[in-house]
Amino acid sequence: MTENLPKARPDLLTPGPAAYARGAEALAAGDLVSFPTETVYGLGGDAGNDKAVAAIFAAKGRPSFNPLIVHVLGEEQAESFAAFDDRARRLAELFWPGPLTLVLPRKPNAPLSLLVSAGLDTVAVRAPVHPVARALLQASGRPIAAPSANVSGHVSPTAPIHVAEEFPDGGGGRLKLILAGGKCPIGVESTVLDLTGEQPVLLRPGSVTREELEAVLGPVALAGADAGVKAPGMLSSHYAPNLPVRLDATSVGADEALLAFGPDQFTRGGHERLNLSPTGDLHEAAANLFAMLRALDKPCCKAIAVMPIPEQGLGVAINDRLRRAAAPR
Ligand code: TXA
Ligand code: MG
């Protein structure tokens, strides 16, 4: 961006009526506000304001061909810009508010920035269930475009301190406040489902599972070569810590950090050790995933070794994020 804004640390505010009013004011002025959702922290801007949406891309250093999710209170607000069919209505009824993002046709003349869709004729929309996200949506009365509040390619933030660390200068000056609403309960980003074609396509696994979607819709395809969908979020290296990540570790070196899951039986190695869930609970593991990757990402170690995670339920989403963290950069 060519503007020269004062680069200042964003304010961390405790959620409450005064904080929501300031958040709404900042959004109305075209500035950015970070807020917690049930999945991860978002970097929010008014989805109808081109300057605000451009500021999101600039703050993240995000390639602008990667479109953003528009957050709403519910289906009624979403209907003003997205075309719902029967499938979309059923899913919204069953899973909203909650961690399911629907990619739908964008209505002609939708009152949204074109940049939100990165030039596509579709739009991704979700209604978060987190009370702080909902209070901000209420206070602003506007749909809020919000990617995860991290620099593009970094690990997603699940606590306010992560957001502050990602944007020490306020993301170029536009990020004015962080609504500090504690730790995100789910911890991995929403499930993204493309409903713009006849065949529903799962673009990103999340805590709403493929099985749950198939119970409502019938067969759901996986994004990939065969689905014919180029999901922009599928850039393979993503969610990457600085250290290399080694998956399915059955041993750990003395110079490695260990990210364990379930009973940690390694008696040797593991310069630093954290356990996603000693009891092997996938929900607990998802909630800890990004914070523990950040905590282990220290120069004292050569790599992060990760124990195997079962590929079921939320484990599918956890393994998806881990594979991207381990992908060649
Ligand atoms: O849980 C979440 O979804 C979080 C919180 C803040 O709501 N947001 C989030 O946003 O993860 P972001 O921007 O980091 O991820 C959005 C994903 C990307 O993979 C993007 O490519 C995909 O959704 N997406 C957005 N709009 C799309 C569209 N029109 N067509 C296909 N994919 C789209
Ligand atoms: Mg992201």
Image (spheres, rainbow, N blue to C red):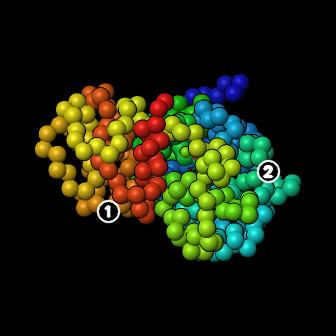
Q: Is residue 293 visible?
A: yes
Q: Residue 236's spot in the image, x, y percent?
A: 53, 39
Q: Nearer the viewer, residue 37 or 180?
A: 37
- Where does ligand 2 appear, by image quarter? top right
Q: Say which label, 2 or 1, has the lower sequence index.
A: 2
Place residue 143 in its image quadrant: bottom right
Callout 1 amino acid: Asp
* Residue 281 badge: 1
> Which quarter of the rendered picture does the N terminus lie within?
top right
Residue for point 35% across, 42% down: 247
Instruction: Answer with left or right where residue 244 lies relative to residue 63.
Output: left
Q: Is residue 18 visible?
A: no
Residue for point 29% across, 47% down: 307
Secondary structure of the residue carrying tag 1 is loop
Q: Nearer the viewer, residue 315 or 51?
A: 315
Residue 211, placed above or below residue 278? below
Instruction: Answer with left or right where residue 14 lies relative to residue 171.
Output: left
Secondary structure of the residue carrying tag 2 is loop
* Residue 130 badge: none
Q: Residue 183's spot in the image, x, y percent?
A: 41, 54
Residue for point 28% across, 60% down: 280
Cα separation, mark 2 vs mark 1, equals 40 Å
Q: Residue 294's spot in the image, x, y percent?
A: 37, 40
> Callout 2 environment at 10 Å: few (<14), some (14 to 19), or many (20+)?
few
> Callout 1 environment at 10 Å: few (<14), some (14 to 19), or many (20+)?
some
Ligand 1 lies under 8 Å from the Cβ of mark 2:
no
Q: Which residue is mark 2?
A: 121
